[in-house]
Image (tube, helix red, strand yellow):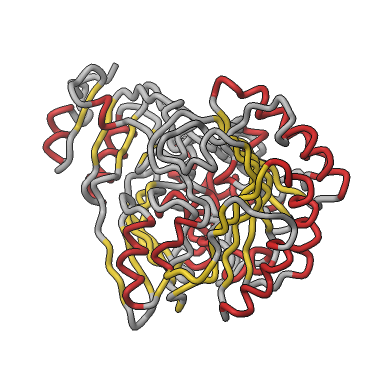
């Protein structure tokens, strides 16, 4: 329960007067709608919600939370909602939707309520494209802060690699502008550290001259599963960085909006995106087309505005369980094990099992160092299932666990939110640096919900206190 500030702290009325957006407390009408997530498996029950409309609203929310001893979480679209927010301050940023394109400089600056589809739509008429995700309804900021693996990843790297600057409200309730010259340590940490260091209120990133792609998806029948997966494993070895690919086992529902040939079927979905001459793209895809007759071949030249058609991610909210692993290799025995364990004849009720190719520009930071991990992997395995099928989903990941790097991609951690699981998203040295920066910028661990990084110890080896941090002279 949140008090009214009678002890001298900011009162409920003071908070409402300081914030342009709605301020809602547990039991208020409209709270359930305000905090609803895309992943319906996570149901928030915060003590107080601030529907932010500006950086000033976020500042007021964080300061109020500090005064009342509340941890702080943030939500834009709710795609990454795997840890329910309970008894905390939740800042919703969906009303902050300003976008500014600089066509000459090839950059975009957006607020945290912006989704990728909005950026793509504005940039496409200028022949420009962002390093977006596979879904147009995912929020820009959360995607970037977690690294950001997209359909052009092997060509351009992670989305976080191309951030020029950002503003964020840190745990002390101060809005800061950071880039490579201003608060460079914080700039390093935020790009890959997700929401551990503050609430981003704007972010500026590069756009690229990509008016079109040779891209799309090919659906193969269940009978071709092993042949297609084995061919894929060999095919990717010689692909240039301009080609980014993945392959997925899909158990499709009997949904009326699906084509008859896919409805209720098990299929193998090859996804490709080639940045370059379409004729070369067609030549590169030809070996996979020759493996088996396809059900649907949707690969061809497309304007970048149609990039979402490659993966065809769901755009309507639903409950789901998610998990992922980074792989150092995909040997022949792994292919056989996947076909046997997750293929069409397996009793494995998962909706999606995807193997995504890594490497190329994903292997190193593109605009100077940042905290994004997972650059040593050759593949990434992802599973999505109904929450009721969690055990089956875990078993499917165990099939490829022997080939894991031991690491993970933060944006694909899904339900792996325990501290030891979160730590796997970074190399040990980078995680130690993140803990030290967490101690510097958020010593009381205000932003401890979600994929939490615990503050490191102080020089004496003990846990740092807020008072000690304030006395250090560091922000």
> Could you say where residue 34 lies in the image, as x and y percent from the top left?
26, 32
Residue 153, quarter of picture = bottom right
Q: Is residue 307 visible?
A: yes
* Circle count: 0
Residue at 54 percent of width and 26 percent of height = 386
> Could you say where residue 68 lies in the image, as x and y percent from the top left?
31, 27
**Relative to 281, 185 lies left or right:** left
> Could you say where residue 285 lies in the image, as x and y percent from the top left?
67, 67
In the image, residue 275 above or below residue 293 = below
Foreground residue among 360 and 89: 360
Residue 204, quarter of picture = bottom left
**Relative to 343, 66 lies left or right:** left
Name the quarter where the N terminus is drawn: top left
In the image, residue 12 above or below residue 432 = above
Foreground residue among 112 and 121: 121
Q: Residue furthest right?
A: 333
> Could you say where residue 210 lies in the image, as x and y percent from the top left?
46, 75
**Relative to 393, 415 lies left or right:** left
Foreground residue among 20 and 354: 354
Q: Is residue 431 visible?
A: no
Q: Residue furthest bottom?
A: 104
Residue at 55 percent of width and 63 percent of height = 299
Residue at 17 percent of width and 27 percent of height = 12
Residue at 72 percent of width and 36 percent of height = 343
């Amino acid at each position: 329960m949140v008090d009214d500030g009678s002890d001298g702290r900011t009162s409920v009325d003071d908070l409402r007067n300081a914030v342009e957006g709605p301020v809602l407390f547990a039991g208020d009408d409209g709270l359930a709608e305000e905090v609803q997530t895309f992943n319906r498996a996570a149901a928030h029950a915060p003590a107080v919600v601030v529907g932010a409309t500006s950086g000033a609203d976020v500042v007021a929310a964080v300061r109020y939370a500090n005064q009342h001893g509340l941890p702080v979480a943030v939500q834009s679209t709710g795609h990454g909602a795997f840890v329910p927010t309970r008894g905390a301050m939740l800042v919703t940023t969906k009303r902050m939707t300003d976008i500014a394109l600089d066509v000459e400089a090839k950059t975009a600056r957006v607020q945290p309520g912006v989704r990728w589809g909005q950026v793509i739509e504005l940039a496409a008429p200028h022949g420009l494209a962002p390093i977006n995700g596979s879904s147009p309804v995912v929020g820009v900021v959360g995607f970037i802060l977690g690294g950001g693996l997209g359909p052009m990843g092997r060509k351009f790297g992670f989305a976080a690699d191309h951030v020029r600057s950002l503003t964020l409200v840190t745990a002390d309730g101060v809005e800061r502008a950071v880039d490579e010259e201003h608060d460079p340590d914080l700039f390093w940490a935020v790009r890959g550290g997700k929401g551990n260091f503050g609430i981003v209120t704007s972010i500026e990133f590069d756009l690229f001259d990509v008016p079109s792609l040779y891209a799309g998806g090919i659906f193969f029948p269940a009978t071709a599963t092993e042949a297609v997966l084995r061919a894929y494993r060999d095919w990717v070895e010689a692909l240039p960085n301009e080609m980014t690919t993945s392959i997925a086992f899909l158990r499709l529902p009997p949904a009326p909006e699906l084509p008859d040939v896919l409805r209720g079927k098990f299929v193998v979905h090859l996804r490709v995106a080639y940045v370059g001459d379409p004729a070369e793209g067609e030549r590169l895809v030809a070996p996979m087309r020759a493996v088996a007759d396809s059900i649907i071949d949707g690969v061809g030249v497309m304007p970048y505005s149609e990039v979402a058609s490659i993966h065809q991610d769901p755009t309507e909210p639903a409950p789901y369980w998610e998990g992922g692993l980074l792989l150092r290799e995909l040997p022949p025995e792994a292919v056989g094990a996947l076909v046997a364990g997750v293929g069409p004849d397996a009793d494995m009720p998962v909706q999606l099992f995807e193997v995504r190719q890594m490497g190329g520009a994903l292997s190193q930071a593109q605009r100077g160092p940042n905290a994004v991990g997972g650059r040593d992997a050759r593949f990434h395995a992802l599973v999505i299932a109904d929450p009721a099928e969690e055990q089956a989903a875990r078993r499917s990941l165990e099939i490829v666990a022997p080939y894991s790097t031991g690491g993970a991609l933060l944006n694909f951690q899904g339900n792996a939110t325990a501290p030891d699981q979160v730590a796997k998203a970074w190399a040990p040295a980078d995680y130690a640096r993140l803990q030290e920066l967490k101690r510097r910028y958020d010593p009381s661990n205000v932003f401890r919900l979600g994929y939490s990084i615990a503050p490191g110890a102080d020089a004496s080896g003990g846990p740092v206190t807020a008072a000690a941090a304030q006395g250090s002279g560091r922000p």
